[in-house]
Image: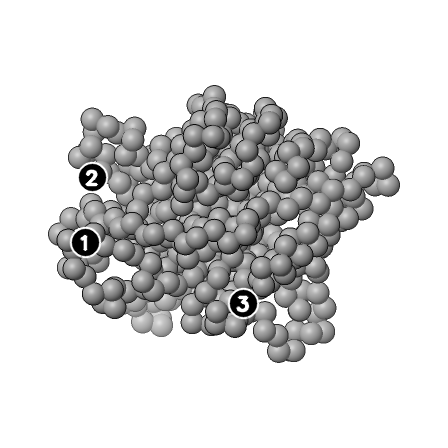
Amino acid sequence: MKWIHKNETETDVSSRPFITPQQRLLNLETSVQREMLEDFENYVKNLAGKMDDTTAIRSRYFCQTRAPSLSRLRPVCYGNLWVTPMFVGTSDPANGLEEAVIEATQCAITNLRTFLGTIDYSMDQAVHCWAVLNQPLESVIFDAFNRVYTSDAFGMPWELNPSLAAVHSERVFPPTRACFTVDPLLDPSVGTSFHSKAVAAVGLILVLCPLAVSAGRGALTGGPSVDEMHVRSLSHWAPASIGPYSQALSVRFHDVRDTDEEEQVDVEDWPPTVVTFYSGQIGLVPETMTLVDRDSTGHDINGQCWLTLRHCHRVTKIKCPSFWRGLFTAFCLGTSINALKQARESFHRAVCSVWFRSDLEKYSYIKHDTCLCAHSVIWAHVTDLPKQACVEWQWITVSEPISRVRIQYTDCLTRLDPLATLIFCNSSRLQQCMFDRGILVPCIGFLDRTEQFAVLCL
């Protein structure tokens, strides 16, 4: 490979030095923080002509009246998107765990599709999926799940049959996805938890775009309101997808804000708000699609945390014009409390302390409440992750944040905010409770919290 410097002639061309994947991982902690800082400084320079102070990015918050409930759906993103309940499929693993996972996935997809049919929706309205299994995500199990997820739900025609690569299809791209394991897995519809040794269980939750319904087109068919990032090729920049999902998917909305009565603003003058969902990212080395080399303890937790964060930053850099300043909410999933602690430390040092430094300095007396670590991220303990990774990040950005996400930790569901949308719950401790207060997402605990529920008001 040849590299020509900007001010050099052809005779000055020299060979570009080869950098191995291992060399790219050297001093990962320092290089990620440096990349974050450089991008932040460039962002501030570009913003200088538009705003006097970067803190003004989060100075405008508007309240959007929530759309009325539709069946068992819950509204998110100012009432412009909907979230389905989790639909769980189960199967007896007596005849083999791989076959049981296939049957459980088929059952979950069938239940979900049937429900969508009752409200005149389809799978093509999906923009994001949370997939929760109760089995370890070893390659055999993960591949079996992906095969059914591809063939029965969100696979592209050319993924199902290579000979169809040139055939026109209305399907343009799959939704984003976050996949993880929780054992036991709670089925909120019946209040039952399924243990991995007794039953193979798969749960699916979808985020739907109702705008596509009125337009007669599904989110997956593209159009002016939806665009995505779906990379399958290898590079050193960021990892390719390891399943039938897009790395990021954006939906554009108009008139999602509502001002105070005293403020007279022409809504037509506002640019469209873009909400972007990102698939779960783990610490895969992009060139090899393997996890960072493990140490004598079995995991390189620190390396995975920093590499995962770099992946998140690079995808966000492409899809969100305000970078981390546009973070709406995030979910950090860790297979141990130690992994969550290291993930939070790296996030705070690279994101909070760089992109929100002025906020932390301005509100130092209430730093805990203003830091993104506290008010925008749920730190959930789970059983397993794809590739047996230690940490997985999944997040949502908004082109111009309008309101802060509220996270409420509680042991009592009867006192929840009526606008509660997602409820992460410790399924191992779950007893009789109300399941109609929000969309339940199972986990096995939270970082530095003893409460049973973590509630997001989106």
Kindly identify the amino acid type of the residue bearing the numbered disc 3.
Gly
Q: Residues within 10 Å of mark 1 (few under 14, many from 20)?
A: few
Kindly identify the amino acid type of the residue bearing the numbered disc 2.
Ser
Q: Circle 1 sits in a helix, a strand or a loop, which is it?
A: loop
Question: Mark 2 or 1 closer to N-term?
Answer: 1
Residue at the outermost right position: 95
The residue lying at 35 percent from left, 71 percent from top is 11
According to the image, label 2 marks what residue?
Answer: 358
According to the image, label 3 marks what residue?
Answer: 218
Residue contact between numbered discs 2 and 1, judged by CB atoms under 8 Å? no
Q: Circle 3 sits in a helix, a strand or a loop, which is it?
A: loop
Discs 3/1, front: 1
Quadrant of residue 315 in the image? bottom left
Inter-mark Cα distance, 3 to 2:
41 Å
Question: Mark 3 or 2 closer to N-term?
Answer: 3
Discs 3/2, front: 3
* Residue 176 falls left or right of residue 272: right
Inter-mark Cα distance, 3 to 1:
35 Å
According to the image, label 1 marks what residue?
Answer: 261
The answer to whether 351 is drawn above or below residue 19 in the figure is above
Question: Mark 3 or 1 closer to N-term?
Answer: 3
The residue lying at 20 percent from left, 65 percent from top is 266
The disc placed on residue 179 is: none
Q: Residues within 10 Å of mark 3 (few under 14, many from 20)?
A: many
Depth order, front residue of 148/15: 148
Q: Circle 2 sits in a helix, a strand or a loop, which is it?
A: helix
The answer to whether 213 is drawn above or below residue 205 in the figure is below
Measuring from the top left, give residue 413's x and y in whole percent.
48, 30
